[in-house]
Image (cartoon, grey):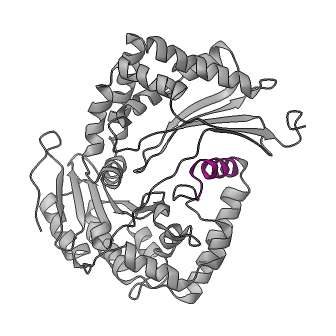
């Protein structure tokens, strides 16, 4: 085991790798009252095979159901007795497990984590029960929610059969066809130490915590596990219309981006804040305040590892058609492409980003999450922290060029959602 050389800017953070291949980052701060421990696995829905979509999410559920030494239900009971806040999530590029607890309880938490990563037990009874939980989750969260159905259709149209084109929760038929053996094999392959990263932030002593890691998760058996190579295939420009039981019409626009590792990512991030970073940002000011075309409008910049999307979504006011929204959005982009953001716009956006940064990193959870997301996307836990400086360094000229690309060079995807039974549908 070792502690790496300190980074000059984030000198409190210790980075390293255990002998079995597991990587770690420790961010100690004696001012914290608690510590957050997160285990990030470089496996998400993009790593699944055709016919097995949603298996990474299914495995996340099963990780809470017991091991060969900790019976089903005991993990939750012991975490609760420690006063721990426990959660987990699966997304396109990753799965992660998070626990926030008093630092004195970290040894027991790490023992429990090491146990379920090494000795997960998937019985047929537990598997069938959890498969029904996941199937019911899909019915409730996706199939009964118009917005979820809308976005599932949108991404399928954009990504097609490629790995970002299927939902993280999986398709219904695939969920019904899971076998316990599938989940066990997926765990054995994807949860190798070389594909794990642990971030711990809070009231911890780095040397003592590293010794704990070595004794617990460092005991996981090293093994080869190569992440499958994946590519995304994006469609040509399109405009689709669908009907759903929504309260008001929706317009969703999207453009492809180069992914988080591309040099252009920082430019997309600043554009996002200029367009949608606050109530006075360009899109709300133009569409909500000045023209009163929409009930709400938002931009989204996703930080996936592979080529991703920049989205703008709007809920329309009564009597406003989709064409008016297209023209209004294009007018904002045209202004940016022609003259760029003003000095005031740039100064406000960058100040807002710095303030959001400081607030978001105030808690132990956010700091651990920042390190983990950065490791997943960049292979470097500190790259996400350096990204802040890259965004603030973006120039108005770079924003102008990007707006021009969105208007004239990049594919554009559009999905219009109309309320079922509306006049527009007829």
**Hey, which quadrant is residue 324 in on the image?**
top right
- Quarter of the image for the C terminus: give it: top right
- Does 271 sit left or right of 103 as displayed? right
Q: Which residue is drawn at 23% across and 54% down?
A: 203
Q: Examine the rendering and report whether any part of residue 73 can be seen.
A: no
Q: Residue 295 in the image: x percent, y percent?
A: 69, 27
Taking the magenta stretch, the answer to whether it contains residue 84 is no
Please tell me whether the stretch drawn in magenta is mainly helix, strand or loop. helix
Q: Examine the rendering and report whether any part of residue 179 can be seen.
A: yes
Q: Residue 75 in the image: x percent, y percent?
A: 43, 76
Note whether 210 is above or below 380 in the view shown: below
Q: Residue 348 in the image: x percent, y percent?
A: 40, 18
Q: Residue 386 in the image: x percent, y percent?
A: 25, 38
Note whether 386 is above or below 180 in the view shown: above
Q: Residue at x 9, y 52 (%)?
A: 5
- Quarter of the image for the N terminus: give it: bottom left
> Range of the magenta residues?
147-161
**Hey, which quadrant is residue 327 in on the image?**
top right
- Does 104 sit left or right of 337 as displayed? left
For this rendering, which residue is in front, 385 or 393?
A: 393
Counting the numbered discs, the total is 0
For this rendering, which residue is in front, 152 or 338?
A: 338
**Hey, which quadrant is residue 130 in on the image?**
bottom right
For this rendering, which residue is in front, 363 or 127?
A: 127
Taking the magenta stretch, the answer to whether it contains residue 151 is yes
Note whether 381 is above or below 279 in the view shown: below
Q: Residue at x 79, y 38 (%)?
A: 418
Q: Residue at x 62, y 53 (%)?
A: 156
């Amino acid at each position: 085991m070792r502690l790496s050389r300190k980074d000059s800017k984030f000198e409190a953070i210790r980075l390293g790798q255990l002998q079995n291949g597991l990587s770690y980052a420790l961010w100690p701060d004696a001012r914290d009252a608690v510590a957050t421990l997160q285990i990030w696995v470089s496996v998400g829905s993009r790593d699944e095979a055709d016919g097995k979509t949603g298996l990474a999410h299914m495995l996340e559920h099963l990780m809470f159901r017991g091991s060969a030494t900790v019976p089903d239900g005991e993990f939750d009971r012991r975490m609760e007795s420690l006063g721990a806040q426990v959660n987990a999530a699966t997304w396109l590029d990753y799965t992660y497990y998070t626990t926030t607890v008093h630092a004195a309880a970290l040894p027991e938490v790490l023992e429990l984590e090491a146990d379920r990563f090494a000795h997960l037990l998937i019985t047929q009874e537990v598997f069938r029960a959890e498969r029904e939980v996941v199937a019911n989750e899909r019915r409730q969260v996706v199939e009964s929610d118009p917005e979820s159905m809308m976005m599932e259709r949108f991404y399928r149209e954009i990504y097609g059969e490629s790995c970002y084109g299927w939902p993280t929760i999986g398709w219904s038929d695939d969920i019904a066809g899971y076998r316990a053996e599938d989940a066990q094999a997926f765990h054995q392959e994807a949860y190798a130490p070389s594909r794990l990263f642990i971030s711990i932030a809070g009231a911890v002593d780095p040397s003592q915590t590293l010794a704990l890691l070595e004794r617990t998760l460092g005991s996981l058996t090293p093994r080869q596990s190569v992440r499958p190579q994946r590519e995304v295939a994006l469609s040509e420009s399109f405009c689709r219309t669908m009907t759903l039981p929504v309260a008001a019409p929706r317009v969703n626009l999207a453009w492809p981006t180069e992914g988080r590792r591309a040099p252009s990512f920082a430019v997309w991030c600043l554009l996002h804040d200029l367009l949608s970073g606050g109530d006075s940002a360009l899109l709300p000011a133009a569409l909500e305040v000045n023209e009163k075309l929409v009930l709400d409008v938002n931009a989204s910049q996703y930080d996936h590892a592979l080529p991703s999307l920049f989205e703008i979504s709007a809920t329309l006011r009564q009597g406003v058609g989709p064409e008016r929204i297209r023209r209004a959005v294009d007018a904002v982009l045209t202004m940016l492409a022609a003259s760029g953001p003003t000095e005031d716009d740039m100064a406000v956006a960058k100040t807002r980003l710095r303030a959001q940064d400081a607030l978001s990193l105030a808690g132990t959870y956010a700091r651990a999450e920042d390190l983990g997301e950065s490791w997943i996307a960049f292979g470097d836990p500190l790259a996400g922290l350096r990204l802040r400086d890259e965004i603030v360094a973006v120039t108005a000229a770079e924003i102008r060029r990007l707006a021009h690309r969105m208007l004239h060079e990049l594919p554009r995807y559009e999905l219009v959602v109309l309320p079922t039974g509306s006049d527009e549908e007829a």
